[in-house]
Amino acid sequence: MLKEIEGIIIKEIPYGETSKIIHVYTIDGVISIMCKGAKSIKSPFRATTLKFTYGKFYIYYKENKLSTLYSIDIIHSLSKIKNDITLLSYLNYITELTTQVLKQTTNNLYTDYIETILKIDKGLDPLVLTNILEIKYLDYLGVGLNLDSCVLCGTKADIITIDGDRGGYICTKCYQNEIIVDKKTIQMLRMYYYVDIKSISKLKISDKVKNEINYFLNTYYDRYTGLYLKSKDFLKKLL
């Protein structure tokens, strides 16, 4: 049965001398597809079955088995990302992160993942978009943020800062010696969580606020998620 699916290639696996198997992330999950002869120089699939090809894949679909590629129509080239080592590193990281989160949930992450990539390729701030995705993924990892009150006493009043090691908002009564962040940082953390990524058309956030949120999330992920991703380490070295 010939079937059309929209998706993005997140992994390539060599198969024999001339073929490969690709893993395509779709709205229905990850589908494995055999691409016969795709590594051959003359193959029309040679350039279109590379990692991070985003398009419509026409396949001979076999449920619970390896499907076979028939043709591909490119939806978006993602050329801005693919020609910039820093942006490509962001894409590698959010793809590896998404792959790990998918192991913990049956929820649909595809739309947020794709929209984040498309916004980055349009030139919107990759750090902010990545942090937004990271915050949304915390719920699926079982360590979602409490964005309503102090994580220590539960009060909703007098929130003074955020701390990754302690797990979130800190009020004046529970404050010890944590770094005091900008008030805007506390507000923006909530906005990151609730914003619809697809609706974002511009991002105007100060470097101070961006860096404080990113530092908080790096610390929180390291302490509470148990995820240690090579792509994140590489990205940190670039920034």
Image (cartoon, rainbow, N blue to C red):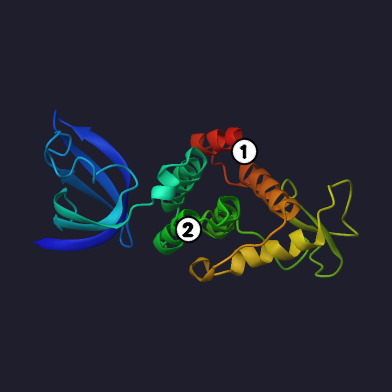
Whole-percent x and y of residue 149? 76, 66
Whole-percent x and y of residue 181? 81, 54
Q: Which residue is mark 1?
A: 239
Whole-percent x and y of residue 118? 44, 58
Give the label, 2 or 1, closer to the camera.
Answer: 2
What amino acid does circle 1 point to?
Answer: Leu
Residue at figure coordinates x 50%, y 37% from the top left? 231
Confirm whether residue 12 shows in the render: yes
What amino acid does circle 2 point to?
Answer: Lys
In the displayed structure, would residue 156 be above or below residue 227?
A: below
Give the farthest residue toward the left: 1
Q: Quadrant of the N terminus?
A: bottom left
Residue at figure coordinates x 55%, y 60% from the top left? 136
Say what secondary structure mark 1 lies in. Answer: loop
In the displayed structure, would residue 28 be above or below residue 238?
A: below
Q: Quadrant of the C terminus?
A: top right
